[in-house]
Amino acid sequence: MSSEQKLWGGRFTEATDAFVEAFTASVEFDKRLAPFDIQGSIAHATMLESIGVLTDKECKAIVQGLENIREEIERGDFFWSVELEDVHMNVEARLTDRIGIAGKKLHTGRSRNDQVATDVRLYLRAEIDVIRQELARLQSALIDLAEREADTLMPGFTHLQVAQPISFGHHLLAWNEMLARDRERLADCRKRVNVMPLGSAALAGTSYPLDRALTARLLEFDRPSANSLDAVSDRDFAIEFAACASLILMHLSRFSEELILWSSAQFGFIDLPDKFCTGSSIMPQKKNPDVPELVRGKSGRVFGHLFALLTLMKSQPLAYNKDNQEDKEPLFDTVDTVKGCLRAFADMMPHLEPNRDAMREAAKRGFATATDLADYLVRKGVAFRDAHEIVGKAVRLGIDSRRDLAELELSELQQLSAVIEADVFDVLSLEGSVASRDIEGGTAPARVRQAAAAARQTLAG
Ligand code: ARG
């Protein structure tokens, strides 16, 4: 394309080097912003008409033209030209093709700098809403499962060593808490996304008396931006989103790790649905937890995008710089990855099959009620440090004779401490132990059911 044919070709005498043209173009990836570019342009045109910059006829032609272009794009009939560099100039050039001179007036009082910032914000706002819904779908599945499994007992771990018995439902609700924070964080991030740059023009604002409040209203932005220099160069909102996304992936990666461990033969706590696993081409017995493994792996790329965006911005002088074009691929990939991972988890969760017997056995094997025995002794007047010592000896006895604490004889326990009576077996049972943690936020099944109900209410609210 010769320089006269470019939308910015006026001051140029030499055609752009073909490699440079391809190197600087963003249309291959920013074409995904087209629906938002069109939405922004329709609002801009409507506002221009309201202040008398466009006639009613011109405005109608622009709006109609843009809507036709939207359909062309949806149908896959739109020809994207690398020579036209980016989504903005592709759409604008096509508009002028279709409607003639009125198309050339659309860009009045606007620059691609405030246009692209607006498009990215509209895009991200829509995606945040989708991601928050996916989070809610996953949370809802977790809460249902937690309620159903409130009485299922399993070992709780610290240091991945059996610590105390807990309700499986309680464990599931711990995951829900993480996701609830993620959802809240995104709602907060959305507030800073939802500010409108249009009217900032290239960097300094514009001499046309644009009605920024009207454009903001039309696009459902909370307000126009307060400083034009900041508005065209700010990408904090994208970084903030990438940070929210990184936390989501960090959480999903932790779940994944547990699902992978739990579905192994060594744990055997759960069965993952066949349709979320694959086999091995050489080992016929294998059923691999591919989905959680892949999600765990994908956390790496999302963390990477956060760093890419931070680094992209760190040395930029005000205001817009071409560097900013590099915000899109990390941002888009972050959105796609988070959505994909959440979808996989939300689809998988309702099919998770707990193996209740295996969980119970594991809790019994690990002396998980040792703390309960210590607490019992304390209630009978033994100082906690002494109780700790006594229980340590009981555990030793259990290890040596391959028995659980509840399987020791009363007489054997009494040799360790004279205060022990027959009622000790109430606290040595898994049920007794779990039921005794009847405190807000604790693992007693009654509390778990309450917590599930509360979580469901928060989700609906
Ligand atoms: N494609 C550009 C971007 O993604 C649009 C803005 C370009 N502005 C400019 N003055 N070159 O950032």
Image (spheres, grey):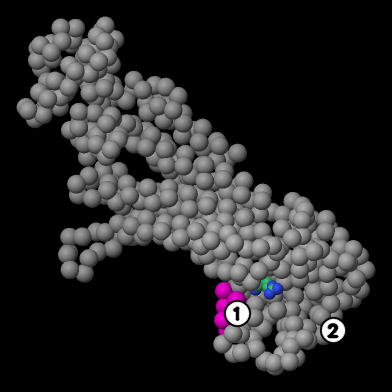
Which residue is under mark 1?
24
Residue 281 belongs to magenta span: no
Ligand 1's image quarter is: bottom right
From the viewer's perspective, is 458 left or right of 199?
left
Q: Is mark 2 within 8 Å of ligand 1?
A: no
Q: Is residue 419 above or below residue 153?
A: above
Visible residue check, residue 291: no
Along the polypeptide, which appears first: circle 2 or circle 1?
1
Q: Residue 222 location, x and y as percent?
A: 74, 51
Residue at position x 76%, y 68% in the image: 202
Mark 1 Cα shell of 10 Å, populated few (<14), some (14-19), many (≥20): some
Residue 107 rendering spot, x and y as whole percentages: 80, 74
Give amino acid for label 1: Thr
- Provide the secondary structure element on which disc 1 rests: helix
The answer to which image quadrant residue 20 occupies is bottom right
Q: Which residue is mark 2?
A: 101
Q: Most prominent secondary structure in the magenta stretch?
A: helix
Give the residue type that dot 2 points to.
Answer: Ile
| Most foreground residue, 433 or 349 | 433
- 87, above or below 382, in the image: below
Which portion, as a residue range, is magenta? 22-29
46 left or right, relative to 288: right
Please tell me whether mark 2 or mark 1 is closer to you in this view.
Answer: 1
Residue visible at 66% across and 63% down?
317
